Amino acid sequence: MKKIEGHDLDIRGLQISEEWKKTDIAGRIEMIQHAPIVIVVWDRQLIDNSWFWYIFGWFSGRSANEFRKLFLYSELDNADSGIPVFVSEKAALYKRKEPLSTALLEAQAELKKHKKKNEAAQALQSMGFAFSSEAMVLASSEGNIDAVTRYLEVGFDPDSCDHRGVPALIRAIRTKNDEVALLLLEAGANPNLQARDNGNTPLIAAAAFERTKILTHLLNLDIELDAVSKNKQSALIVAVGTGVAENVRLLVDAGADTTIRDALGMTAGDYARLFKNDEILKILTK
């Protein structure tokens, strides 16, 4: 074993020698198979060393859910001239410690993400959630923030939709699970993605289900303020229909178009007059 020192790395490299053929064979195999990141100190004699080919085969044959990284290191002149092409395609050769240290730090960060992803997958399994977009949307609608967090850690798209084409974000808004909705937005959910069932955007859904906190948050993002649903209603028209003056005020202050007409030819003002809501009508006409 040879320590890579002075670079704040808790990693050791393997310096293969003839002694490997004589001592502690089982121990060496166990060490190799339990190491996700290995550096082999390279010299041309390794071409004929069975231990090197064992290590190379082990790291090359990893499955999709395993993390293994193999690096070669040598300060010898022309060290790369003796490395077969198929080996260099799987294991990069480094001739200086600084670039090797950078590569190792990147590998350690990848390993950390890989472990977190596996832990999240195991947690979902233990919670009884299926490994599917449909299940993620269900968790969002149930307000299960732990499960949704795990789905995101595993790598599920924050814009995952159910079989009806309703995004997880809109499901969370419809079921009044604000914290899940905020989590999805923080994870990069599209604030303008429409649900296929009724054409609502997250903003329209927030207005429809009186989620002032979510509506306020969305207005601070790059949203389509005047997007309309399948019945041509904007978030402003929907907000007027719910009678929540604060949401109407927030939308008007953000610049929402008060002249949009829905499928019935009605504007937000028309609905305010129809419902005899003088407070909202005043906001609309100020």
Image (tube, rainbow, N blue to C red):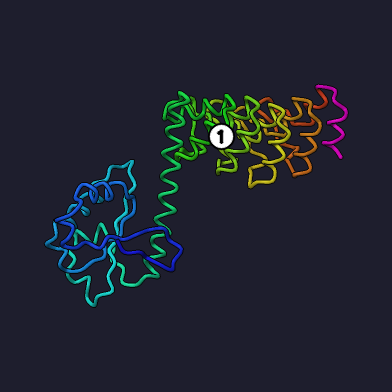
Determine whether 157 is above or below 46 in the image. Answer: above
Magenta run includes residue 281:
yes
Between residue 75 and residue 149, name the one nearer to us.
Answer: 75
Residue at coordinates 72% horizontally, 35% vertically from top-left? 213
Magenta span: 275-286
In the image, 152 versus 210, the foreground residue is 152
- Relative to residue 162, is residue 82 drawn left or right? left
Q: From this viewpoint, is residue 199 visible?
A: no
Which is nearer the eye, 221 or 17? 17
Q: Quadrant of the C terminus?
A: top right
Count every numbered label the image shows and give the total.
1
Would residue 82 be seen by someone viewing this image from the given angle? Answer: yes
Quarter of the picture holding the N terminus: bottom left
For residue 231, what is the image quadrant? top right
The amino acid on which the numbered mark 1 sits, given as a three-letter code, is Gln
**Which is the main secondary structure of the residues drawn in magenta?**
helix
Q: Which residue is mark 1?
A: 194
Of residues 285 and 223, the one nearer the viewer is 223
